[in-house]
Image (cartoon, grey):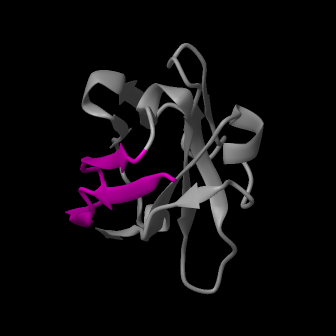
Amino acid sequence: QVQLVESGGGLVQAGGSLRLSCAASGRPFSSYCIGWFRQAPGKEREFVAAISWKGGSTYSADSVKGRFTISRDNAKNTVYLQMNSLKPEDTAVYFCNADQSVTMVRTKNAGYWGQGTQVTVSS
């Protein structure tokens, strides 16, 4: 079993930055790929970014390329999502997930999910 806890969300003005964290426990952290999704009110949950089990490969949605960066620190069992140049349309609940392949964590069918953290960007 894997437990995931997101943190770092909050209220920020447009153009500002936030860093989200996803802390994992229950299994060796380096065994899992990690993904980030977000869901805004009235919209479907959408893929944001993902990282391979060793951190050598990363993926991101077109909507956040150049602004968001995913990274991981296996020694700390933590994955980060650095969000810069935030826009009001980035407002959403952000979830991290985990599974054993990048393919899985880029879908809504990943095996494990955190509870989410709210990000609100004001204009």
Q: Is residue 18 above or below residue 115?
A: above
Can you name the residue that lies furthest to the top here?
56
* Rendered image quadrant of residue 85: top left
Q: In this view, does 5 lie above or below 23?
A: below
Q: Residue at x 59, y 25 (%)?
A: 52
**Total marks placed:** 0
Q: Which residue is drawn at 32% across and 25% down?
A: 73
- Which quadrant of the rendered structure holds the C terminus? bottom left
In this picture, residue 88 sits left or right of residue 84: right
In this picture, residue 2 sits left or right of residue 24: right
Of 99 and 88, which appears nearest the observer?
99
Asked if the magenta segment contains residue 60, the reply would be no
Can you name the residue that lies furthest to the bottom here?
42
In this picture, residue 36 sits left or right of residue 120: right
Most common secondary structure along the magenta stretch: strand
Q: Residue at x 74, y 44 (%)?
A: 104
Q: Is residue 48 above or below residue 31?
A: below
Q: Position of residue 4 (x, y in %)?
A: 41, 55
In this picture, residue 86 sits left or right of residue 34: left
Of 91 and 106, which appears nearest the observer?
106
* Rendered image quadrant of residue 8: bottom left
Stretch in magenta: 1-26
Q: Where is residue 75 in the image (x, y as percent from the top left)?
A: 28, 23
Asked if the magenta segment contains residue 22, the reply would be yes
* Rendered image quadrant of residue 64: top right
Q: Where is residue 78 in the image (x, y as percent from the top left)?
A: 32, 37
Q: Residue at x 40, y 47 (%)?
A: 26
